[in-house]
Amino acid sequence: MKPAAFDYVAPTSLDAALTALADGGYDAKPIAGGQSLVPLMAFRLAVFGQLVDLGRIEELQGVARDGDELVIGAATRQAAIAKDALVAEHAPVLAQATGWIGHQQIRNRGTIGGSICHADPAAEYPATAVALDATIDVASTRGRRSIPAAELFEAAYTTTLEPDEVAVAVRIPVRRPGEGTAIFEVARRPGDFALAGCVVRVATSGGAVIDARVLAFGVGGAPIRLAAAEAALAAGAGVGSQELTAALQADADGLTPPEDAQATSAYRHSIVVHVANTAIAEAIADSQ
Amino acid sequence: MSRQQVEMTVNGRVHAGEVEPRLTLVDFLREDCALTGTHTGCEQGVCGACTVLVDGEPMRSCLMFAVQADGAQVTTIEGIGGGREGLTPVQQAFMDNHGLQCGYCTPGFIVTVEAFLRDTPSPSDEQIREALSGNVCRCTGYQGIIAAVRQAADQLAAEARS
Ligand SMILES: Cc1cc2nc3c(=O)[nH]c(=O)nc-3n(C[C@H](O)[C@H](O)[C@H](O)COP(=O)(O)OP(=O)(O)OC[C@H]3O[C@@H](n4cnc5c(N)ncnc54)[C@H](O)[C@@H]3O)c2cc1C
Ligand code: FES
Ligand code: FES
């Protein structure tokens, strides 16, 4: 199908884009890579009077280091993140997460800001952003603010951004000594959205886990912290231990994963334990 | 809704026109440029039949609007091989290995593989499969396509050595 008609602007400055969005109100919509938005428009699930293209705005592009943080421009393409040297050194799990996103042709156009703002429940970047304690810098003509990733994702496809706000950058604390990270997921075919996946970050001291973030995706509306597993890990429960297994089971029992043509709710329920176990083991191995 | 001027270089030739912003790049290529080698299968980014190179990188031309390609260098299947040089090693390898049957998916595969082997000159079998994962073929069962990429990769590597 073909999208409904719209007007199109491609400003080269962030200010011009913010003004266009403020003027357009609910009828105006940012477009970045278009890899989620264009299919929605083609199905006419979404209709807008005006698209404001963020793709020609220099200041939304690229990866830089700012003190203890990596600052990634919201319109930086996923393919650029996958091969960025700073990301590989300071936030390697973000590069690993990128490898799970769709296919090369999608990653060549899709952006980090687009993925985060789209907030697909099965997407890799939102859960990774929460696991890494990332912050999202956003701007509108009303000013700027920073939103912790943990407070950004409200529900499936729903964030706490206002319609006139643009994500400008994703700030990620650089990896600290003794930290370990990993991401693992199960999908029907390579490149498909995950049936269930998990991103893990552990902090260790003297080889022992002292803190953990365990984020599941694909099993609820927003990325979900597996809090019992996090607590068990911080209390010293090892991979394969009874304590960790029981904690993961308790976390999984608290979930009501979606059911669709790809997988039943019960199947997602069973694989979330498997992907979490795998990612936890890999994150701990990565910290050593 | 106002029409807009676009100008892009397609296969080395400048194409300009006035288009509706909602015109996808694939429709611009097929209908305004009369380059019908780029196919549409799903028009939702899943099948890969519409893959073209935009500034050298393979992308879905069904998930881009023509206005977004303003100023870009686009390469379609018509810009790859043919003419006096004949088929490229990738195209010849698809023929040699039964990498195509009806041919509907083939332009998307060829464009994807040309960029893949440019960036990954000595790929492992796993890298080949990963690179092909974004293109759907309903005929061949993929084995001939994988064999074709292997042959083309080996041939290009041998040519680079000599
Ligand atoms: C075949 C296929 C397979 C895919 N598989 C996966 C997968 O496995 N995992 C995965 O995570 N994703 C997958 N995707 C989606 C892909 O990652 C998209 O690129 C991503 O979800 C959206 O990024 P985008 O830059 O294309 O954003 P767009 O499609 O341009 O925009 C998406 C939404 O975000 C908004 N937006 C974009 N940028 C900003 C900004 N800076 N500030 C405010 N709002 C903004 C837009 O208004 C829109 O609502 C797949 C897509 C396709 C077509
Ligand atoms: S037509 Fe573009 S991916 Fe199928
Ligand atoms: S050859 Fe027919 S779809 Fe691939």
Image: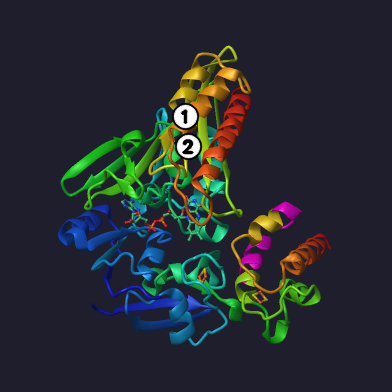
Residue visible at 31% across and 48% down in the picture: A158
Hey, what amino acid is under mark 1?
A: Asp
Start-end of magenta stretch = B111-126
Q: Is A92 on the left-hand or right-hand side of A213?
A: right
Image location of residue A238, percent across then percent down: 60, 18
Asked whether residue B55 appears in the rendered view, the answer is no
Quadrant of res B118: bottom right
The subunit carrying tag 1 is A
Q: Secondary structure at mark 1?
A: helix
Question: Which SS type dominates the magenta stretch?
Answer: helix
Quadrant of res B116: bottom right
Q: Which residue is mark 1?
A: A251
First in residue order: circle 2 vs circle 1: 2
Q: Is B117 on the left-hand or right-hand side of B18?
A: right
Hey, what amino acid is under mark 2?
A: Ala
To the question of a shared chain for discs 2 and 1, the answer is: yes
Q: Which residue is mark 2?
A: A216
Residue visible at 57% across and 42% down in the picture: A185
Ligand 3 lies in quarter: bottom right
